[in-house]
Image (cartoon, rainbow, N blue to C red):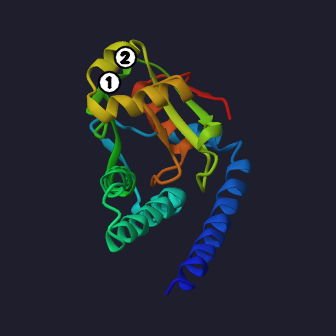
Amino acid sequence: MSAVIPVVAVVLLAVSLLLRMGTELRRHRSWEDLPLLRQSMAEVDVEGTEVEVVNKPLKAAFVWLPLLMLLAVTVLIVFQDARTATWGRLPFDVLVMLALVYGTARKLSPGPVLVMNCAGVAFPRHGVSLTWSQVREVRLTEVARHQRALNGDESVIAFLPRDTRAVMRRMGGLTRLAAVTARNAYGSPLAVLVAPLDLSAEEIAVVAEKYAGRADLVTDER
């Protein structure tokens, strides 16, 4: 059994690397996607409609593969602590494992990440919604350096609010802590990694512009 784990890890990493190479090649070929999508959306009537951008668990599993592997190692350490009666270290290791379980569950859970309509944009996982007049800019950027271990499309879409402090006051607990990290990395507490989502960064950006009625809403800094 112990010999199987490294083999499975290598296979998963190889598959993950191939997926990452594919998505990166598509991203580097998509420099013209934004203007083309703007043209295709020009005549679309969005009045009374709504777009949900959802997390895809299978895609997220490959994106967050390093986190999953860390969780697996932590579970093995806890099991080893219990088996060898290492009671002094066990409580700390269990706390680390529970924190990783919570974080992994949030990363992999399905459901809407963004909800956009003519009134504004909602972030269900942040417990925050903004009207389009409260959105200063939508920025497409690359994943921050400390997250380079992630797999897949390394694009982040960040909705920059006009009043960042007011937005963060509406968040609580671990959500606010994650928002601080996002703000420091991407200039906004409302920054979303695109790789595990069902729409591309360009598609989300163009839909946001259409709903907001502002052709200059999006800035591509990739």
CA–CA distance in space, label 2 to label 1: 6 Å
- In the rendered view, does 187 fall on the left or right side of 47? right
Q: Which residue is mark 1?
A: 130
Residue 6: quarter of image = bottom right
Residue drawn at point x = 61 percent, y = 66 percent: 16
Residue 141: quarter of image = top right
Tell me the element at label 2: helix
- In the rendered view, does 19 fall on the left or right side of 168? right
Please say if 84 is above or below 51: below
| Horizontal and vertical percent position of residue 162 | 42, 13
Callout count: 2
From the viewer's side, name the closer residue of 88 and 59: 88
Residue drawn at point x = 71 percent, y = 42 percent: 31
- Circle 1 packing at 10 Å, graded few (<14), some (14-19), many (20+), is some
Residue 33: quarter of image = top right
| Horizontal and vertical percent position of residue 139 | 56, 28
* Residue 42 visible in the picture: no
Q: Which residue is mark 2?
A: 134
Kind of residue at badge 1: Leu
Please say if 213 is above or below 205: above
* Residue 3 visible in the picture: yes
- Circle 2 packing at 10 Å, graded few (<14), some (14-19), many (20+), is some
**Marks 2 and 1 in Cβ contact (< 8 Å):** yes
Residue drawn at point x = 52 percent, y = 44 percent: 203
Residue drawn at point x = 52 percent, y = 36 percent: 157
- In the rendered view, does 162 fall on the left or right side of 29? left
Tell me the element at label 1: strand
| Horizontal and vertical percent position of residue 38 | 57, 37
Kind of residue at badge 2: Gln
| Quadrant, the C terminus | top right
